[in-house]
Amino acid sequence: METWDAIRSRRNVRSFDGKPIPAHDLDQVLEAGRRAPSSQNWQPWDFIVITKRSELRELATVWQGAGHVAEAAAAVALIAPVTSDERRAAACQYDLGQATVSMMIAAADLGIGSCHAGVGDQEHARRLLRFPEDRHCAYLISFGYPLARPLSPVAKPDRRPFDQIVHREHW
């Protein structure tokens, strides 16, 4: 798939067919996250990959909107430093967003669906994933092959119209 097709094909997938993702494809998705742009090349992330079904089911309980993680072929937990510096925290969130979308587009390019989720219960996430006390689990991304329909470019996405979003030279 070409980049533009991957961008147009990517959508939130919450139902997966159960087929495992080949290790080299999963590594390619993770490499896309690793190579994501980062403010001052800070790279504040660590990625924890989860593929065991029992672990995925338990991880799905850290947030009410993370149910899709339970049936995914894999999930990636994005781990970030804890900071009280508001500027640093904002830069971290932006960087994590870039890593997230990089992984999701790389996955779409391989025909792998994805969906992101927040993490509400940090202590439960820490018990499951064993990340250090000076870190938190910022997001989860589930990955797997779509159950209902394969990824393909969406001709008419459910998005605000282009001319209502794009302003040239001024509002």
Image (cartoon, helix red, strand yellow):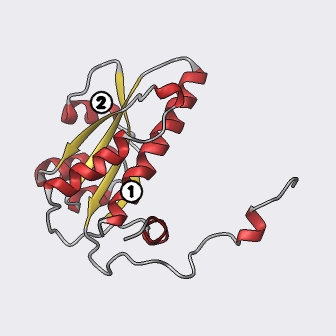
Q: Identify which residue is drawn at 35% across, 48% down.
A: 32
- x and y percentages locating residue 134 in the rendered image: 35, 18
Q: Distance of mark 1 from mark 2, alpha carbons?
A: 26 Å
Q: Which kind of residue does numbered mark 1 sit on?
A: Met
As drawn, is 96 to the left or to the right of 122?
A: right
Q: Is residue 17 visible?
A: yes
Q: Identify which residue is drawn at 15% across, 68% down.
A: 19
Between 87 and 111, the residue placed more toward the observer is 111
Residue farthest along the right direction in this orientation: 170
Q: Which kind of residue does numbered mark 2 sit on?
A: Glu
State the quadrant of the N terminus: bottom left
Asked which quadrant contains residue 147, the reply is: bottom left
- x and y percentages locating residue 151 in the rendered image: 36, 75
- x and y percentages locating residue 82 in the rendered image: 42, 22
Q: Identify which residue is drawn at 20% across, 73% down.
A: 17
Q: Is residue 61 visible?
A: no
As drawn, is 92 to the left or to the right of 53?
A: right
As drawn, is 86 to the left or to the right of 58?
A: right
- x and y percentages locating residue 114 in the rendered image: 35, 61
Which residue is disc 2 drawn over? 123
Say which of marks 1 and 2 sits in front.
1
Which residue is disc 1 drawn over? 104
State the quadrant of the C terminus: bottom right
Which label is found at residue 90?
none
Circle 1/circle 2 CB separation < 8 Å: no
Label 1 element class: helix
